[in-house]
Image (cartoon, rainbow, N blue to C red):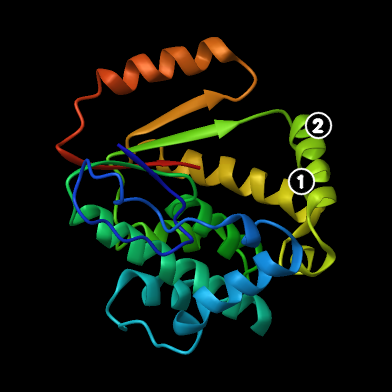
Amino acid sequence: MKTVNGYRRIDFVSFGSEVDSVEDEGPETRHGIQRLVHKLATASPVLFSTPPSEGAAARLLASIPPKSRIWALRLKIDVVLLFEAWNTAQASEGYFIFEEGIVQALCALVLLARNPSIDMVRNCMTFLPRPDLLIQVDAPGETLRHRLIERYARQPYLERLLEVGVVRGLKQADIAREIGQCLQDKWPLMRVDGLDPRNFEQVVARIVGHGLPATACVGPD
């Protein structure tokens, strides 16, 4: 089983090997300017490329265009890397947990869309790859607010410029709940109360008994 951040390149060698993991960040890239430069360097090949027009990444970006050119470039990087990771996972053996998966990308696109509408999401459901299991983790609004404030307080100024901020972050959580309602009858969905440890235990038990295939993609959003 591997945990994947969907917005970073991954390279799997063989299942069970110690080297078949997500491309990791060294200590020098975990702080401030170094981390930002590292992100820009790894994203530059995507930024100047054109994803295949028939692929899910290109179709998703065309279906929900962001209102800002800067956000369009940022989300292009995120979405293309996500589907690269997804395709790599599907072609590999084992179980893959996506920390930031397709629903996360949908939420960001709807949040920053020119004309946001939940109907956009319904249209995208016709071509987006479906995870074997989707886990939706939620918490009360005030808890999310405190977590977002603490998160942004730890980030350097330049990195915060590439984030949506606390207010829009809370709005994105509302969008995630609405998307979850749309998906509950279409995708295998489990909801988790992020404040209840017992709820996590119940979900783990349900996942164990879910009967996932030999190669499975699981996305918590």
Quadrant of the rendered image containing residue 86:
bottom left
- Residue at image mark 2: 142
Which is in the foreground here, disc 2 or disc 1?
1
Residue 58 visible in image: yes
Residue at 51% across / 46% down in the picture? 179
Relative to 201, residue 73 above or below: below
The image quarter in which residue 88 lies: bottom left
Give left or right: position of 149 versus 49: right
Q: What residue is drawn where x is 45% and y is 83%? A: 45
Which numbered disc covers residue 68? none
User: Disc 2 residue type?
Assistant: Glu
Above or below: residue 2 compared with residue 81: above
Q: Position of residue 66 (x, y in %)?
A: 61, 75
- In the picture of the structure, the residue carrying the numbered disc 1 is 151
Query: Exactly how many numbered labels are in the figure?
Result: 2
In this rendered view, identify the residue nearer to me: 202 or 156. 156
Residue 98 rendering spot, x and y as whole percentages = 41, 46
Label 2 Cα crowd, 10 Å radius (few <14 / some 14-19 / many 20+)? few
Describe residue 103's horizontal placement relative to residue 161 as left or right. Answer: left
Residue 114 appears in the rendering: no
How many neighbours does mark 1 have within 10 angstroms: few (below 14), some (14-19), or many (20 or more)?
A: few
Q: Is residue 141 left or right of residue 138?
A: right
Amino acid carrying label 1: it is Arg
Q: Nearer the viewer, residue 40 or 125?
A: 40
* Separation of residues labelled 2 and 1 (CA atoms): 14 Å
